[in-house]
Image (cartoon, grey):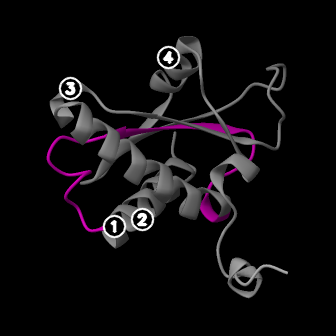
Amino acid sequence: MNGDTATQGDRPPAVSVCVLGLKSRPEFLAAARARKQGTKGMMVQARRRAPDEPAPQDAIRVGFTCSKKVGNAVARNRAKRRLREVARLVLPRHGRGGWDYVLIGRAGATTTRPFEDLQADLIYALSKLHSDRA
């Protein structure tokens, strides 16, 4: 019996368990043409998948990207690691099945912003993206 079994119930599941990753360029481009919501720590793009797409309809799919504006490779990788962890914690509770999300790192903000604020940024962006606006 593993010692951390009791604490495992307190943590949300890993992204790989409940969320599929966006991999191909067309998937990212489709999200780029859809809804967008910026926050201080990131830009979030979201789109509802069509029923005829091959992905499971109840799955949440997410992708991460950071341009060279964020910094060198070390800074970009750190920003993406932080975005992946935020997504792991927030999307299972606040994301919607049948949607694709792309989280884009911001220069000077994603790597330095307090982690709790990054989580609040994603929750805010998701609430705006899923509101019934036109």
Q: Quote the CA–CA distance across marks 3 and 2.
A: 23 Å
Task: In this rendered view, identify the residue nearer to me: 107 or 71.
Answer: 71
Where 131 sits versus 123, above or below? above
Give the labeled residue for mark 4.
Answer: 29
Residue at the spot 79% in from the left edge and 27% down from the top edge: 55
Q: Which amino acid does label 1 sit on?
A: Phe
Q: Do the residues labelled 4 and 1 touch (CB within 8 Å)?
A: no
SS at mark 4? helix
Give the labeled residue for mark 3.
Answer: 68
Q: Quote the CA–CA distance across marks 4 and 1.
A: 28 Å
Q: Are marks 3 and 2 in contact (CB under 8 Å)?
A: no
N-terminal of the pair, mark 4 or mark 2, is 4
Q: Which region shows up in magenta?
A: 93-114
In the rendered image, residue 120, in percent from the top left (x then y), is placed at: 39, 67
Q: Which amino acid does label 3 sit on?
A: Lys
N-terminal of the pair, mark 3 or mark 2, is 3
In the rendered image, residue 78, in percent from the top left (x then y), is placed at: 31, 46
Residue at the spot 57% in from the left edge and 57% down from the top edge: 88
Q: Are marks 2 and 1 in contact (CB under 8 Å)?
A: yes
Mark nearer the viewer, 3 or 2: 3
Give the labeled residue for mark 2.
Answer: 119
Q: Quote the CA–CA distance across marks 2 and 1.
A: 6 Å
Q: Which amino acid does label 4 sit on?
A: Leu
Give the labeled residue for mark 1.
Answer: 115
SS at mark 2? helix
For the residue carrying disc 3, how many other residues have a C-alpha within 10 Å: few (<14), some (14-19), or many (20+)? Answer: few
Residue at the spot 68% in from the left edge and 84% down from the top edge: 7
Q: Quote the CA–CA distance across marks 4 and 2.
A: 25 Å
Q: Quote the CA–CA distance across marks 1 and 3.
A: 22 Å
Where 77 sits versus 32, above or below? below
In the rendered image, residue 95, in percent from the top left (x then y), is placed at: 63, 54
Mark nearer the viewer, 4 or 3: 3
